Image (tube, rainbow, N blue to C red):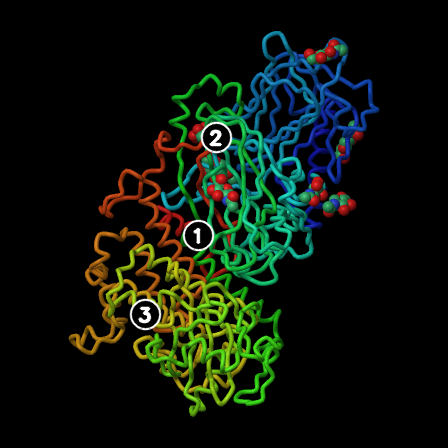
Amino acid sequence: MMLRKGIDVLLLWILSILHLQSSCEGYNPPDNYLIDCGSSSNTTVGDRVFIADNSAASKFLSTPEDVLAKSSSNAKGDSPLYQTARVFTGSTKYTFPATQKGRHWIRLYFSPFVYNSYNMSSATFSVSAQSFVLLNRFTATGVVVKEFSVNASSSSIVVTFNPSDNSFAFLNAIEVVSVPDELIQDDASVLPSGNYQGLLVQALETVHRVNMGGPTVSSANDTLWRTWVPDGNFLVQASLAKNVTKIGAVNYVSGGPTPNIAPSTVYGTLTEMNSASDPNSNFNVTWQFDVDSRFRYLVRFHFCDIVSSSLNQLLFNVYIGSSIVVSNLDLSTRTFNVLAAPYYLDLVTDVIDSTTLRVSIGPSTESGGYPNAILNGLEIMKMNNSDGSLSGDSSAVSSGSSSKSMVGVIVGSSVGGVMALAFIGVLLVCCQRRRKRFSGQGLSKTWIPISINGGTSLTMGSKYSNGTTASIASNLGYRIPFAAVQEATNNFDESWVIGIGGFGKVYRGELSDGTKVAAKRGNPKSQQGLAEFKTEIEMLSQFRHRHLVSLIGYCDERNEMILIYEYMENGTLKSHLYGSDLPNLSWKQRLEICIGAARGLHYLHTGYATAVIHRDVKSANILLDENLMAKVADFGLSKAGPELDQTHVSTAVKGSFGYLDPEYFRRQQLTEKSDVYSFGVVLFEVLCARPVIDPTLPREMVNLAEWAMKWQKKGQLDKIIDPTLAGMIRPDSLRKFAETAEKCLADFGVDRPAMGDVLWNLEYALQLQEAVLQGDPEDNSTNMIGELSPQVNNFSNVDASVSAVALEVEGGAVDDDLSGVSMSRVFSQLVKSEGR
Ligand SMILES: *[C@@H]1O[C@H](CO)[C@@H](O)[C@H](O)[C@H]1NC(C)=O
Ligand SMILES: *[C@@H]1O[C@H](CO)[C@@H](O)[C@H](O)[C@H]1NC(C)=O
Ligand SMILES: *[C@@H]1O[C@H](CO)[C@@H](O)[C@H](O)[C@H]1NC(C)=O
Ligand SMILES: *[C@@H]1O[C@H](CO)[C@@H](O)[C@H](O)[C@H]1NC(C)=O
Ligand SMILES: *[C@@H]1O[C@H](CO)[C@@H](O)[C@H](O)[C@H]1NC(C)=O
Ligand SMILES: *[C@@H]1O[C@H](CO)[C@@H](O)[C@H](O)[C@H]1NC(C)=O
Ligand SMILES: *[C@@H]1O[C@H](CO)[C@@H](O)[C@H](O)[C@H]1NC(C)=O
C-alpha cells in the first residue's frame, strides 16, 4: 500500500516538475530521478527536490542491509545532501526505469563522515552502470561529486555498488537524469579521415568543466544542472590572460548551439590574451588540467566572440598540447556570420603517458588585425576504454601494448556538407535578419564626402603640406599631395608601370618612408572614371579586411585621380596561371589563394550592413602579396546590394567578358550571386590555367566556362586540368572543388551558393587535399588515387604525449526547413555521403 502510494506520488511529483520546467523553457528530462540517500525528508537543492530514501522499500534500491547514516556534525555548511548517507555492506543495486532510451547523467555525491563503526573516509568500493565500470577501488577523501553519462540501451539503468575486500560502500545522493540528444552526437564526422563513430555508445566522465573568464556557474543556473568552475586555477600563467564579461551579448541562433550546450553565463564570459595594447603581442594563453593517462578524451571547446565589434576581426589558433586543433579559426565563418553566436568544437584526443592535458589559444600569424585569441568554456570528458572502464585503476592492468590499439588519431575538421547546406538555409535567414536589424543604415550614411578635383582641397593634417613625409601611420585613406605621388613613382616613370586597366595605368612606387605602393592614375577626362574613383575610395575606406587590397591614400589635386594602394609583391593571380614564365603554383597554393579571395568577397557580401557586390571578379583582380596571400582588388564597379537601391536594377551591364553572369546579362539584375558566378569562372581558370576567353582555340573551347562545364557534366573534368597539376590533386579534393565551381555557374542566381558556402567548400577541398599528407606520412608519393587513409595511425609516429585531433561539429541540428526537406535529415545524409 505504502509502496503504491509512494510511486503514485512520485509520478505526480515528476509530472509537476515536468510541467514547472516546461513553463520556464528549460529542458524537461523524461527521466529525472533525484534521491537524497538515507534521508527521511525531501531535500530541495535549487529548483529541484531530492526525494527521501529512508525506507528499505525504496522502489529503486536493492541492498542486503539497510544502513541509514546521519552525520552528527551539521555545522559543515555543506549541501543538505551531505547530512545523510546510505551505507552498503554488500553488493547493492539502484534500478531506475528508463522511460526513454538515450544518454542519461549519473551524478554521484560523496561526502564521507563517521557513523557508528563506519568510517566512510576509508570505505573502498567500485561502482558500475550498464556494462561500464565508473569507479574502481574508489575512496572518497573529501566532498566529491562524480558526473558520468551513459546511453541507456535497455529499459532500465542499473547502478551497482560493490564494496572491495572487507570494506563497504556509501552514497550521499544520486541523480539519474535524461540528457537531451543534442548534447552528445554520435556520427560526428571526422575529416579528413571519415567518421568518428560511436560517441553515442561511449560512457563519459566529466573530468573538467570550466567557465573561462567568469565565476562558478552553479547547477541551478544551468539548464542541465551542470556545474562550471572558473578557469583561474588552471591558467599556467595568469598574467597573460584577461577576463571579459558580456552576458547580454550572447546571440543564440537557430541551428547553432542552444543554451543546453552551454548557458549564456558560460558563452557570455571569456578569457582572452592580455596583450596590454601591444599590437605585436604574440603568445599563447595556456591552461593545464590533470587527467588520467591511457585514456581517450572528448574535449569540447566553447567559443562566442563577444569581443569583436564586427565580423572577421578575430583570427586565432587553438592547440592541445603541441598539436594544432584549428589554425586561423575565424568564428564568423562558423556562426553563419552572426557576431557573438555560440559555437563549439569537439575533438577526441588520446593521453598516453602524461597526467596533464594542456590547452592553448594564440593569435594567428595570418591575422591582419589586432592579435587576440579567446576561449569561453571547456569541457574535458573521459571516454571509456576498451575494457569498458572509466577508472584509472582498472586500466592500469592493461599495459602499454593496449594503449597502441586504442588509438585513432585523426587530424580533424568540420562536418563537411553539413555546414554547406546549413549555410544556404541559415545564411538566408540570418542575412534577412541582419538586414532588418541594420535597416536604415545604408551606405549613404557612411559616404565619405570628398571634393573631387578641388585644387584647394584640405589635406589630411599638416603631414603632407610640405610634400616630404608621406608616411602611412593610419589605416584611413589619406589625401596625398601630388608632389608626393610624383616623387614616389619617379615622376610616373613609364618603366615603372606594372599594369594598365580601363581606368588608367598602375605604377609601382615607394613613399618617402619606404612603404611600397601601387599608384593607379586615372584618365582625368573620363566622367565614368570619376564615378569609379569615388566608388573605390568610398568602398576601400569602409572595407578593411586582410583579403581586400587596402587603400593607402588618394590624390585629387590638379584634376588628377590617383589611388595609392598597398603594393602586392606577386602581382595578379592571372599572371601566375598563364601567359608568363612565373613558376607554376601548386594545388595547395591555388586552393589557399581561392580561399583568401573567397574570404574577401564573402566579407564584401556579408561583412557590412549592406551587401556590396564587386561586379568585376576575375583573376586579374585577385592580387598576391609576398606570401602569395590573396587580396581582392579593384572596387571601381562595386555596388551596394539590390535590396538597398532598386535603381541598380537598371544599371548598365558592366564587368569583364568571360566572367559575366548570364542572368545579370539577361535580366540586368544585380545580386551577390553575380559575383559568385564570376568567382566560379575564376575557379575553373585556376584549375585549367587558361584564359577565360581564348579566340584562338576551336569554337567549342573558346569560352572556358562552357568548356569546363561540359567536361564537368561528363564527370571528366580531370581531362582538361592544368597538366602541371596532373597527379598532384587528390580525387576528393578535385571533386569538391569542381562541384563548387559548377554550383557557382548555375544558370540562375538562386541556385548558386552564397560566398560563405563557397568559402566553406574550398576549405573543405583543402582539407581533403591535406588529408593525404598529414594523415599518411609514409604515402607522400604522387599516387593520389585511393581511399582515405585509415583512422588508426601508428602511434610510434607521434612523438607528443598528447596527440590530437579529431572532430569538429557544428552545434546542434538546424531546424529550418529548406524546401520542405528537414535539415537534420539532409545533415545525416551529408554526413554519410561526404564524411566518408
Ligand atoms: C517528498 O516529496 C514528495 C513529492 O513532493 C512527497 O509526496 C513526499 O511525501 C515527500 N516525502 C517526504 C518524506 O516528505
Ligand atoms: C544510444 O545507443 C544506441 C546504440 O546502442 C543508439 O542507437 C542510440 O541512438 C543511442 N542514443 C543516444 C541518444 O545516445
Ligand atoms: C577515518 O579514516 C581516515 C582515513 O583512513 C582516517 O584518517 C581517520 O582518522 C579515520 N577517522 C576515525 C574517526 O577513525
Ligand atoms: C577572472 O574571473 C575569475 C572569476 O570571476 C577570477 O577567479 C579570476 O581571477 C579572473 N582572472 C583575471 C585574470 O582577472
Ligand atoms: C544563478 O541563479 C540564481 C538564482 O537561482 C541567481 O540569483 C543568480 O544571479 C544566478 N547567477 C548567475 C551568474 O546568473
Ligand atoms: C603556442 O603553442 C603552440 C603549441 O605548443 C606552439 O606551436 C606555438 O609556437 C605557440 N605560440 C606562441 C606564440 O608561443
Ligand atoms: C567504450 O565502450 C563501448 C561499448 O562497450 C565500446 O564500443 C567502445 O569501443 C569503448 N571505447 C573505447 C575507446 O574502447
How packed mark 2 is, by other alpha carbons closer than 10 Å (few <14, some 14-19, many 20 or more), is many
Cα gap from disc 3 to disc 2, whole angstroms = 46 Å
Cα gap from disc 1 to disc 3, whole angstroms = 28 Å
Mark 3 and mark 2 lie on one chain; the one further toward the N terminus is 2
Mark 1 and mark 3 lie on one chain; the one further toward the N terminus is 3
Q: Does the image show residue 215?
A: no
Q: Where is residue 53 in the image (x, y as percent from the top left)?
A: 72, 24
* Vertical order, 828 against 478 (above or below): above
**Taking 2 as reference, is 500 left or right?**
left
Amino acid on which disc 3 is placed: Val
Q: Where is residue 261 in the image (x, y as percent from the top left)?
A: 59, 46
**Taking 712 as reference, is 433 left or right?**
right
Amino acid on which disc 1 is placed: Phe
Q: What element carries label 3?
A: helix
Q: What element carries label 2?
A: strand
| Residue projecting furthest to the left | 698
On residue 681, the disc is 3
Amino acid on which disc 2 is placed: Val
Q: Position of residue 556 (x, y in %)?
A: 51, 85
Would you say the residues marked 1 and 3 are in contact, meaning their CB atoms lie under 8 Å apart? Answer: no
**Taking 647 as reference, is 178 left or right?**
right
Residue assigned mark 2: 351
On residue 827, the disc is 1
Q: What residue appears at the point 57 percent right and 22 percent down from the top-left corner?
A: 135
Cα gap from disc 2 to disc 1, whole angstroms = 31 Å
Q: Quadrant of the N terminus?
A: top right
